[in-house]
């Protein structure tokens, strides 16, 4: 599983390097090279006054997202999640959905979390999206047609032996591809989620998830939909 995860991350890093014309080492160490001496706190991610602002780093991430999807690599406890929270709270270009995946154990739960997060964001969009109100309303109606096992209680979503989640994931992908609403999924601890799925259901299910994710990255390339995933393996 670790090999599969690392392969996916390497593919995204190569894509990021091509898009930004950065040396590979700089892309991999994007966070580490912006690390400064600070007090290490054990607990939830820093926010507000406890968060050390990193405007240059966040600007780099946003510029990279303009060109494609981003793998945000860096050691644990160096502020990746806090940066995601800052992007979620203050960027004004995308409708953002921030998901912590480390407690999800099935593809149904992951898909349900993305759909439910998008529904919530569409139901109460920030005021800066007032000009796209009609597009958001239309997109929301289409998203509401999806029935995902586990939506509303994603932590309890169980494995569907009929692989119905794959069909629903295909429908979700088609809806995203047909939308004009700019959407950004911030997926924290994605490799951790894959490891949990592998332990519970085996590597074949992880392969199903990665196949969908690769399809999403390819088919949404021309759409205004982006994924930013964090990985602590750097």
Image (spheres, rainbow, N blue to C red):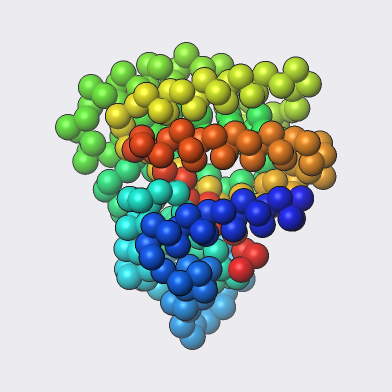
Q: Is residue 129 above or below residue 139?
A: below
Q: Is residue 200 left or right of residue 118?
A: right
Q: Is residue 29 left or right of residue 50?
A: right
Judging depth in this view, the residue of 18 and 189 nearest the camera is: 18
Find residue 162 and report its image quarter.
top right
Res 84 → quadrant: bottom left
> Is residue 161 depicted above or below 103 in this figure?
above
Left/right placement of residue 39 relative to residue 143 reads right
Q: Residue furthest left?
A: 131
Q: Position of residue 4 (x, y in %)?
A: 71, 50
Which residue is rendered at x = 23% and y = 22% of the image? 134
Residue found at the far top of this picture: 145
The residue sitting at 72% across, 40% down in the picture is 206
Q: Could you say where residue 148 lies in the image, as x and y percent from the top left?
A: 59, 21
Relative to residue 176, is residue 126 depicted above or below? below
Identify the residue at image location x=74%, y=55%.
Answer: 2
Q: Quadrant of the C terminus?
A: bottom right
Q: Is residue 69 visible?
A: yes
Which residue sits at x=69%, y=29%?
157
Whole-percent x, y for residue 58 in the image: 36, 63
Number of marks present in the image shown: 0
């Amino acid at each position: 599983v670790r090999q599969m995860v690392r392969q996916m991350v390497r593919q995204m890093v190569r894509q990021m390097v091509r898009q930004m014309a950065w040396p590979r080492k700089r892309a991999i160490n994007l966070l580490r090279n912006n690390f400064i001496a600070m007090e290490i706190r054990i607990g939830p991610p820093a926010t507000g006054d406890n968060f050390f602002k990193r405007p240059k780093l966040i600007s780099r991430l946003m510029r990279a997202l303009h060109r494609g999807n981003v793998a945000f690599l860096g050691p644990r406890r160096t502020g990746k999640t806090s940066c995601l929270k800052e992007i979620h709270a203050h960027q004004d270009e995308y409708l953002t959905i921030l998901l912590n995946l480390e407690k999800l154990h099935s593809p149904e739960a992951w898909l349900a979390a993305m759909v439910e997060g998008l529904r919530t964001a569409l139901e109460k969009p920030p005021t800066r999206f007032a000009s796209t109100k009609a597009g958001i309303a239309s997109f929301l109606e289409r998203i509401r047609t999806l029935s995902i096992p586990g939506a509303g209680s994603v932590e309890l979503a169980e494995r569907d032996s009929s692989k119905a989640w794959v069909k629903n994931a295909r429908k979700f992908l088609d809806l995203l591809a047909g939308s004009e609403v700019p959407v950004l999924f911030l997926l924290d601890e994605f490799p951790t989620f894959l490891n949990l799925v592998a332990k519970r259901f085996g590597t074949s299910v992880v392969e199903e998830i990665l196949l969908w994710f690769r399809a999403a990255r390819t088919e949404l390339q021309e759409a205004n939909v982006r994924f930013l995933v964090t990985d602590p393996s750097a």
